[in-house]
Image (cartoon, grey):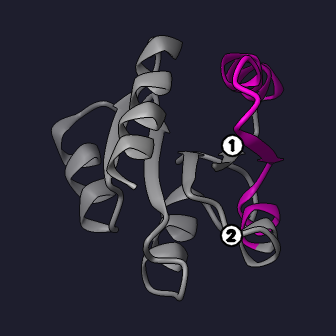
Amino acid sequence: MRILIVDDNIQMRNLLRITFSTHTDYELFEAKNGLEAMDLIRKFPPDIVFLDIMMPGDIDGLGVCEFIKKSEYKSCFVVLLSAKGQKMDIELGLEMGADMYLTKPFSPIALLDVVEDLKTKS
């Protein structure tokens, strides 16, 4: 299973990498901004993307989510990760096509559960 981690915060990417690195059947990719994420998605289409919303640059997480869900990669499962936890933020993320919205801080175990659940449905 290919997992793409997209976050401008290196500590968050490290946390997610460590969380998933215990599973040898996961192929991990990382991007620190929206443009890098879109490039990796084209080169190595992921099964699941853990995507921060607030990132610097021209394309934020919502833009990447929209790109995924309106493209040939639309079957990719998108989990938005954000410190923005108000109802309107969550609704906007889901309207953009996200399959799940988790607010920071979150449990790394919950992320493993998401991936395992997706694997059993595949």
Q: CA distance from mark 2 to mark 1?
A: 12 Å
Q: Is residue 34 above or below residue 1?
A: below
User: The C terminus lies in which quarter of the figure?
Assistant: bottom left
- Compared across the picture, whether 84 is left or right of 49 comes to left
Secondary structure found at label 2: loop
Q: At 33% across and 67% down in the image, what residue appears? A: 97
Q: Nearer the viewer, mark 2 or mark 1?
A: 2
The amino acid type found where label 1 is placed reads Ile
Secondary structure found at label 1: strand
- Compared across the picture, whether 16 is left or right of 64 comes to right
Lower position in the chain sequence, tag 2 or tag 1: 1
Between 91 and 15, the one lying in front of the other is 15
> What residue would you read off at disc 2?
45
- Residue 81: x %, y % from top left: 48, 36
Tally of numbered discs: 2
- Residue 39: x %, y % from top left: 81, 73
Q: Is residue 106 above or below residue 51?
A: above
Q: At 50% across and 23% down in the image, what residue appears? A: 112
Q: Is residue 84 visible?
A: no
- Compared across the picture, whether 95 is left or right of 36 comes to left
User: Badge 1 local density, few (<14 within 10 Å), some, or many (20+)?
Assistant: many
Q: Is residue 61 above or below residue 116?
A: below
Taking the magenta stretch, the answer to whether it contains residue 5 is: no
- Residue 104: x %, y % from top left: 46, 21
> What residue would you read off at disc 1?
5
The amino acid type found where label 2 is placed reads Pro
User: What segment is highlighted magenta in the picture?
Assistant: 10-38
